[in-house]
Amino acid sequence: MTEVNVQAPAEPAPALPDYLLDPNATLKDSSVSWRHGKAPDYSNTRKIFSETKEMNHVSGSLPDLVENLVKNWEVEASFKPDLSDWRTVDRNNYSFAINGGPAQDAEHMLKVGTYNAIIAPNEYYSPEHSDFDSSHKTFKRMMPTFAWEVIEVYSGPPHVSFKWRHWGTMKNDYVGFNAKGEKVTIKAHGGPIDIQGVTVAKVDDKVRLQKVETWFDPMEMFRQIDPHGTISKNVSPVVLTEGGDASAANTSAGACPFHAN
């Protein structure tokens, strides 16, 4: 009688988490606390992304998975004020560093905001004179959409290194406070803002971010905002209110609805 070699069926591959497969996965979280009471609207940014991106990654490819992970992380870092709601990071082992600087934990970014966490004080802007909400309003007022894409992935998990691109259009005036506390106004030129950088991220077995290190030139954005170096400064002292909001005596940075990136 002929023996039949019957092999046990192979174990199915573990399913990938939704934040790797869908750039909007964390936007669908319904039982979490959102910074402004509800999930933000990314429809405009996603539309601009699809119309003006440079890369067309194959769905499910490593660049596509990395791109989705970072987009979902950005949603959580910007709009989920409770760290326990973040799904894209290993909360007990997470840190973020810029240009070889000191590593910061997630609570730091939750406190100061994503823009303030990555921009050092300069002649155009200073985190010292802007809190979480005012920093986001400053840049989102000027550039209502700021799309992001992965250009190239150099290595895969557990150490993922990749090059990225962040871009938008300067549709409104830039108004911010610089390192001296001066109000800086730059007229909108209607042209593109396009910056690039490199990130190396260590991830765990669930492909959650642990150690994130990013390198880019933060002044490149301001050089593109003010290509001719003709800034208009209205010098006035900055007053921090009890809640930490930045304002200027006898001047106003102007308030506008919060626009999701």
Image (cartoon, rainbow, N blue to C red):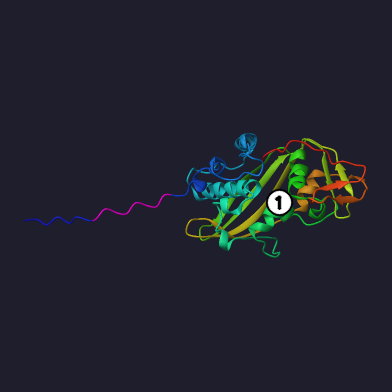
Horizontal side, residue 54 vs residue 115: left or right: left
Q: Nearer the viewer, residue 37 or 224?
A: 37
Q: Where is residue 52 in the image (x, y as percent from the top left)?
A: 64, 37
Quarter placement of the N terminus: bottom left
| Residue 52 in the image: above or below residue 130 | above
Where in the figure is residue 237, as x and y percent of width and height? 92, 50
Residue under the point 50% across and 55% down: 207
Whether residue 118 is visible here, answered yes or no, is: no
**Residue 34 appears in the picture as rendered:** yes
Instruction: Give 43 or 220, whichever is nearer the viewer.
Output: 43
Query: Which image quarter is the C terminus in?
Result: top right
SS at mark 1? loop
Tell me the residue that label 1 is attached to.
113
Residue 7, horizontal then vertical, whole percent: 22, 56
Majority SS type along the magenta span: loop
Q: In this view, does 214 lie to the left or right of 116?
A: left
Residue at screen point 88% across, 50% down: 238
Q: Is residue 140 magenta?
A: no
Rendered residue at 57%/47% (across/down): 72
Residue 54 quadrant: top right
Label 1 crowd (10 A; few <14 / some 14-19 / many >=20)? many
Whole-percent x and y of residue 250? 93, 42
Q: How many labels does the image show?
A: 1
In the rendered image, the residue lying farthest to the front is: 242
Give the magenta-colored segment's residue range. Answer: 8-15
The amino acid pointed to by label 1 is Gly
Q: Which residue lies furthest to the left in this view?
A: 1
